[in-house]
Image (spheres, coloured by chain):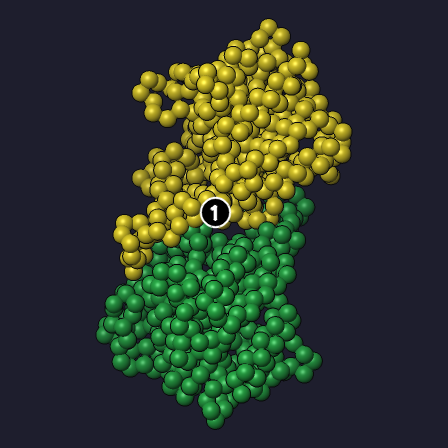
Chain colours: A green, B yellow
Amino acid sequence: MTSESQSVGIVETKFFHINEKIELESGCMFGPVQVAYETYGRLNEKKDNAILLLHALTGDAHAAGFHSKNDKKPGWWDDMVGPNKAFDTNKYFIISSNMLGGCSGTTGPCSINPETNKPYGLTFPVITISDTVKVQRKLVEHLGVKKLIVAGGSMGGMQALEWAIEQPDMVSACITIASTGRLTAQGIAFNAVGRNAILSDPDFNNGDYYGREKQPEKGLSIARMVGHITYLCEDAMHQKFGRRFQSKDKPNFDFNIDFEVESYLEHQGRVFVGRFDANSYLYITKAVDYFDAAGKYGSLEEAFKNTNAKFLIMSFSSDWLFPTQQSKELVKALVKTGKDVSFCEIDSPCGHDAFLLEFETQTKIIKSFLAKERRLHD
Amino acid sequence: MTSESQSVGIVETKFFHINEKIELESGCMFGPVQVAYETYGRLNEKKDNAILLLHALTGDAHAAGFHSKNDKKPGWWDDMVGPNKAFDTNKYFIISSNMLGGCSGTTGPCSINPETNKPYGLTFPVITISDTVKVQRKLVEHLGVKKLIVAGGSMGGMQALEWAIEQPDMVSACITIASTGRLTAQGIAFNAVGRNAILSDPDFNNGDYYGREKQPEKGLSIARMVGHITYLCEDAMHQKFGRRFQSKDKPNFDFNIDFEVESYLEHQGRVFVGRFDANSYLYITKAVDYFDAAGKYGSLEEAFKNTNAKFLIMSFSSDWLFPTQQSKELVKALVKTGKDVSFCEIDSPCGHDAFLLEFETQTKIIKSFLAKERRLHD
């Protein structure tokens, strides 16, 4: 962030409607779809200065700015998006949309099924990263965009890869941060435990809990706790909480919250159930599990063969959920295929969460990558 | 294991009763206590050839041999205990007991409280590693043992350390495998998630579920799944399951078990609820969280100052639950205090579970350590 970087100010979430049915990867025909999105900056005359930001597991369309003057918390990547920031709204037209299956304005399991006038719940079709990219493509075309840069961290990085591979005609650059071409067995295992906690919660009621007195809060909260352990690295957790007790300097000798780290997890779980839908958590983690960039191509090299994008791959030294090694596999495949790829491992103690925290280094690297891309482009 | 190593054959679990109340670390006076134990080999005349084996989180007294001719599965460390094995019953009198708070014969939350004639449930007092060592001391004294060697992996290693530190008059050697002087914040966090899953299960019924139709199986199963992710390392998991689907080569597009790794976790959870008590899981993980070898001494060096044991500390290269670094901290403190310590990091792909799997290397190292200890001793 330079000293002149500014906020995008007050922004509004808008809605785009796809009224026809789209074919999902599962074969299911699904629609209509509403897409919640925000934009920052302006599309140029050539309609080629767009950047599509892709959110992580529990993100939403609100990437930057505030929704009102009284809003205390800005969008999830506010430090990265605005005049003179990494994603510079003086130069770029930035788009951010909530993913298909989400619970923040885009059609998802909590949306009303127009055929039944009831929320979809588990009748919502299982979606994939490819499906959400298809929906995003319709949005960016609707906005008049001809070429675009895609960028995202974690699951957002998966979407960026999917864009570059499956929509090569549109993508001029792809920024993938703290991400992977596919989850390992351990990654799937962590998601499976989270889903299990939700599915086992008696208040889950087979996904039909909307409007009921009881919500599957306990299950969703446990899923979030597991997630948070994987977002921080052991060192960061130990620096942050150590073995300190919560309220006094000795153990409770009971099963209430004892250690600070327990209180942190409990807090994260509690806050999360207030803002996220348990069904969406099931659908989105499943999409993450299914994602495999190499997928139908048989290898990453084959998958990258037809891409036309320049790539920037970034990882964080202490990220053990999507460790540097997994980014390097992407880089290796891109180099083998003769693609233009820049790679950087950022030294950070923040674990996987670093992509939401380490703004200064990310800003420098992204600015330099985008400046080069722009020069080549003009 | 040498070619002449043999099984201990058919063994029997015995019971020892402490009829008075003992003071627990919490200050609570608790008793009577029944201790389930097994012994293999014979105590010598000098009563100084005993080895006390200490089990891990969900272990029991049945360390070796079979309970009957039809028994299909031997004890949990059968490959390590027997004539000519690492813990050689030709030379040693081996004792193994179920820990206080357990659910395999030693008094725990599922035992009947003689004052109410009902199972203790959550009225069972919160216990610590120190409390279980106190109980074990009464057992070994009852068996006539004057000096002993203590040995254990994971939580068993914590008990071994506690023995060496708190009962220095009895312990001549301490073997600590894949263990730690204390859990980090991450370790506590994983245990906390497991406990949360149990406490959130409506069938847990505040710990009062014995004899009821429904048991807190879902919560306990989720706790076990989380545990199993930490027992295997990422590489081992990926070697074992990769991203393979369970029953066919494509996704289900639903929330049933999809990937092999999900099936593995589900199986581990299901088997576990058949053999373990949810309340015991709460109590024992809590004891693990509380364990801090440095504890009241302020530092590991101070804690080790009065020990009289020779130490063997072993770790496994791929163990990320109790990584080698944590074993090295123990070694460093022992060296600083001028104690006799041997250390070995065993190269293994098996993660934390290696102490239950890597028998050959462990056997060589333990045999050599014990032979040296015996020579010095005689």
Judge from the rendering whether residue B96 lies leftward or rightward of residue B24; answer left or right.
left
| Residue A29 can be seen, yes or no | yes
> What kind of residue is marked 1?
Asp
Q: Where is residue B187 in the image (x, y as percent from the top left)?
A: 56, 45
Image point (69%, 15%), residue name: B376
Other-residue count near label 1 (Cα within 10 Å), few / some / many at <14 / 14–19 / ≥20: some
Image point (66%, 53%), residue name: A239
Q: Where is residue B272 in the image (x, y as percent from the top left)?
A: 39, 38
Decide: is A293 above or below B310: below
* Screen quadrant of the N terminus of chain A: bottom right
| Residue B216 can be seen, yes or no | no
Judge from the rendering whether residue B261 lies leftward or rightward of residue B372; answer left or right.
left
Decide: is B86 above or below B124: above
Q: Residue furthest bottom?
A: A45
Judge from the rendering whether residue A39 lies leftward or rightward of residue B140; answer left or right.
left
Judge from the rendering whether residue A79 lies leftward or rightward of residue B207; answer left or right.
right
Q: Which of B10 and B283 is in front in this view?
A: B10
The image quarter in which residue B370 lies: top right
Decide: is A63 above or below B129: below
Q: Position of residue A357 (x, y in %)?
A: 60, 67
Secondary element at image label 1: helix
Q: Position of residue B155 (x, y in %)?
A: 55, 34
Image point (68%, 23%), residue name: B309
Image point (64%, 15%), residue name: B374
| Host chain of mark 1 | B
Residue behind mark 1: B235
Decide: is B174 above or below B377: below
Q: Which of A56 and B211 is in front in this view?
A: A56
Q: Which of A314 and A249 is in front in this view?
A: A314
- How many callouts does the rendering have? 1
Q: Residue furthest left?
A: A115
